[in-house]
Amino acid sequence: MPPQNLAQQRLLIKGGTVVNDDCSAVADVYVEDGVVQQVGPNLTPQPPYGLLVLDASNRLVIPGGIDTHTHMQFPFMGTRSKDDFYTGTKVGEQAALAGGTTMIIDFAIPQKGCSLIEAFDTWKSWADPKVCCDYALHVAVTWWSNQVKEEMKSLVQNKGVNSFKMFMAYKDVYMVNDEELYAAFSCCKELGAIAQVHAENGELIAQGAKKMLAMGITGPEGHEMCRPEEVEAEATQRAVTIAHAVNCPLYVVHVMSKSAARVISNARREGKVVYGEPIAASLGTDGTNYWNQDWAHAAAHVMGPPLRPDPSTPGFLMDLLANDDLSVTGTDNCTFDICQKALGKDDFTKIPNGVNGVEDRMSVIWEKGVHSGKMDENRFVAVTSTNAAKVFNLYPKKGRIAVGSDADIVIWDPKATRTISAETHHQANNFNIFEGMVCHGVPVATISRGKVVYEDGTFNVTAGEGKYVSRPPFPPHVYKRVRQREKVCQPVPVKRAPYTDVVSAAPGTPN
Ligand code: URQ
Ligand code: ZN
Ligand code: ZN
């Protein structure tokens, strides 16, 4: 008799095309105890009993998606985002597993003056009993002190955190100034962490918002008009400059505009260690929605930085993503239903910021990126999974289908289509910013650590089954260059004979 549950521990995915970021090949994948054991043609694992076989012929077998940017059950702007770690990963407004995402990285965000470690512990205590896929946590630095510096060190050394987000916006709430950015970036570099920025000029937003309200513009269009894209581009350039000054790798979250993307692209061409993260929203829709006659429709798209009214923005960002000017994709999934959005019905500055995406990211990128001919299936894997795994030091455990990797795998049907709709999505939210979009590319089955957790619309996963994943510092993909530069690119003084002649101030110069 095979031991109980053996079928779940032993899995053969047969006849699919295995796609990694660097190659595709027809091969079977054999999984045991949650880890890939063999990849190759015509595998016949022994003994045959208790083996679950999945037919993947005519389908792609891809590494599970990694969503680098979510906010589950986030207390924000007087409310809390609707998807929690259960609904957001399994069946909520946006359900990661249903969309082919097997890992999320959420953000622990302390209030100013509060402990980063306590924030981390709080977020982890929310996630652990509920989360259905693997997860990790970025931590935000919202103020600066010696305590913050010590806590960053402890988070890196004891809690498996290797990324910290600094907000350049949300004045008086989360925003840090340039001096604090300099200190935080320096600390990240010393610890081997990635510095992340929300790049918008918070001072200009505050002034712009006052101006819009004084002009009687209280609706969602005011949200975009008070922070046009140069507000994002200026902050992006400033962050690039400060990070470069301290030789710290920089990761710009939620790239929303052409001009911010150009700043990142130029920085990369100048050899700076910078990564840009467009999100499903910025790749799949645009800011013309803020001018929609229906207030609820317009408000549902409010997020920061905003979607841009130039309708060619999503295509432009996809081109840069295809060409490696931009590197990684997340969603910033932070869902609020229409009643929550209505907190700002008379004042756009009070509309809770955030949109959906975690369930739809993979399909939206396949449709707009691969089906459109901008990228091949290997680049798709790179931008939805592998690059994130490399940047956040999860590779090759995550982000690759190879012997020894976690069996986080998606059987992907590139020909099937689905129409995205709030009526049918697995999220709790009553609005979907991709409503009506027909996407080629559908996950047929999602496998998390060797277990089939989602297949043809049916889930087989319980709350708390996902695991926290520690991320060691100094990801080689990011830090090899940084460390070498540290060694060889230090400024050196010019050796010269000392000046020995007369020293005198101009007569009459006050002391
Ligand atoms: O800025 C973010 O990432 C969070 C706090 C809120 N969501 C958003 O509008 N981008
Ligand atoms: Zn942000
Ligand atoms: Zn965010």
Image: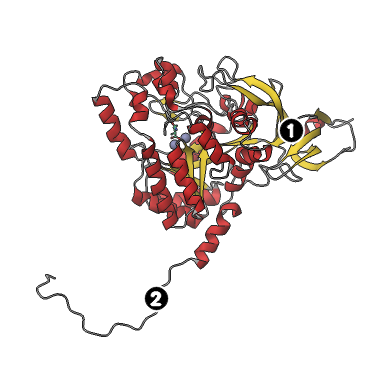
Q: Is residue 426 above or below residue 6?
A: above
Total labels drawn: 2
Q: Is residue 237 above or below residue 245?
A: above
Q: Is mark 2 within 8 Å of ligand 2?
A: no
The answer to whether any part of residue 106 appears in the image is no
Q: What's the residue at 49%, 23% (across, down)?
A: 82
Residue with the most extreme left position: 508
Q: Position of residue 312 (x, y in %)?
A: 48, 31
Q: How would you rate the neighbour count of disc 2 (Cα within 10 Å): few for under 14, some for 14-19, many for 20 or more?
A: few
The residue carrying mark 1 is: 60
Q: Is residue 192 left or right of residue 341?
A: right
Please tell me which residue lies in front, 412 or 186. Answer: 412
Q: What's the residue at 55%, 36% (across, down)?
A: 318
N-terminal-most mark, 1 or 2:
1
Figure quadrant of residue 346: top left
The residue carrying mark 2 is: 494
The answer to whether any part of residue 26 appears in the image is yes
Please tell me which residue lies in front, 80 or 245. Answer: 245
Q: Is residue 143 left or right of residue 374?
A: left
- Secondary structure of the residue carrying numbered label 1: strand
Q: What's the residue at 58%, 58% (across, down)?
A: 480
Dividing the image into 4 quarters, which one contains the N terminus? top right
Q: In whole angstroms, how far apart are the C-alphas of marks 1 and 2? A: 59 Å
Q: Is residue 247 above or below residue 102?
A: below
Q: Position of residue 144 (x, y in %)?
A: 37, 48
Q: Amino acid at mark 1?
A: Leu
- Secondary structure of the residue carrying numbered label 2: loop
Q: Position of residue 121 (x, y in %)?
A: 50, 39
